[in-house]
């Protein structure tokens, strides 16, 4: 692919991404969403985060990451008990680091 073709491709992708992100915001500006739509949209961040975590925990090539699964269980307990994102992040990093040293 030449540099000119790459630039055209890049600009087309940029326009599509901006349209997908900006047009809904502009079209819905000032309008109230139904409770059902609001509930559905509120599930997107946890689902995206769960997909990222699952991708790291269950690798088809390397198998299941035992320290990762153990740290995820510890984080689940902290999340259930505190409900705090910052505590989940801190405990998760500490548990993963500690279990990585042991395993």
Image (spheres, rainbow, N blue to C red):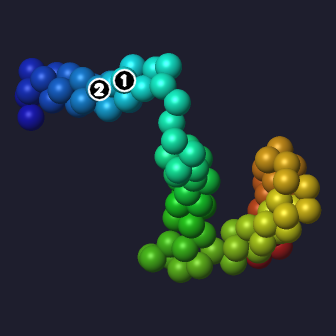
Number of numbered callouts drawn: 2
Is 97 positioned to the left or the right of 35 in the image? Answer: right
Picture layout, residue 44 above or below residue 77: above
Residue drawn at (85%, 64%) of the image: 80
Crowd band around label 1 with a 10 angstrom C-alpha radius: few (<14), some (14–19), many (20+):
few
> Separation of disc 2 and disc 1 at Cα?
11 Å
- Estimate the x, y position of residue 54 in percent, counting from the top left: 56, 66
Q: Secondary structure at mark 2?
A: helix
Kindly identify which residue carries mark 1. 27
Image point 50% across, 19% down: which residue?
A: 30
Q: Is residue 11 left or right of residue 54?
A: left
Name the spot of residue 59 as percent of width and height, x first.
50, 72
Residue 13: where, in percent of width, then height?
23, 31
Res. 95 in view: no
Please, what secondary structure does the residue beneath circle 1 have?
Answer: helix
37 vs 21, left or right, is right
Q: Quadrant of the C terminus?
A: bottom right
Residue bearing mark 2 = 19
Q: Which mark is residue 86?
A: none
Q: Residue 9 appears at what percent x and percent y?
A: 15, 29
Residue positioned 18% across, 26% down in the render: 12
Residues packed near mark 2 inside 10 Å, few (<14), some (14 to 19) or many (20 plus): few
Decide which of 59, 29 is in the foreground and name it: 29
Q: Is residue 31 left or right of residue 67?
A: left
Nearer-N-terminus badge (2/1): 2
Between tags 2 and 1, which lies in front?
A: 1
* Residue at figure coordinates x 59%, y 60% from the top left: 50
Above-or-below relation of 24 to 48: above
Quadrant of image for the N terminus: top left
Between residue 61 and residue 85, name the one nearer to us.
Answer: 85
Q: Is residue 8 visible?
A: yes
């Amino acid at each position: 692919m030449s540099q000119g073709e790459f630039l055209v491709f890049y600009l087309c992708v940029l326009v599509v991404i901006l349209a997908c992100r900006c047009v809904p915001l502009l079209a819905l500006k000032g309008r109230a969403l139904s409770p059902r739509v609001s509930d559905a949209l509120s599930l997107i961040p946890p689902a995206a985060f769960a997909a990222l975590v699952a991708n790291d925990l269950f690798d088809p090539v390397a198998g299941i990451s035992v320290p990762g699964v153990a740290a995820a269980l510890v984080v689940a307990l902290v999340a259930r008990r505190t409900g705090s994102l910052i505590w989940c992040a801190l405990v998760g990093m500490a548990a993963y680091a500690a279990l990585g040293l042991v395993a």
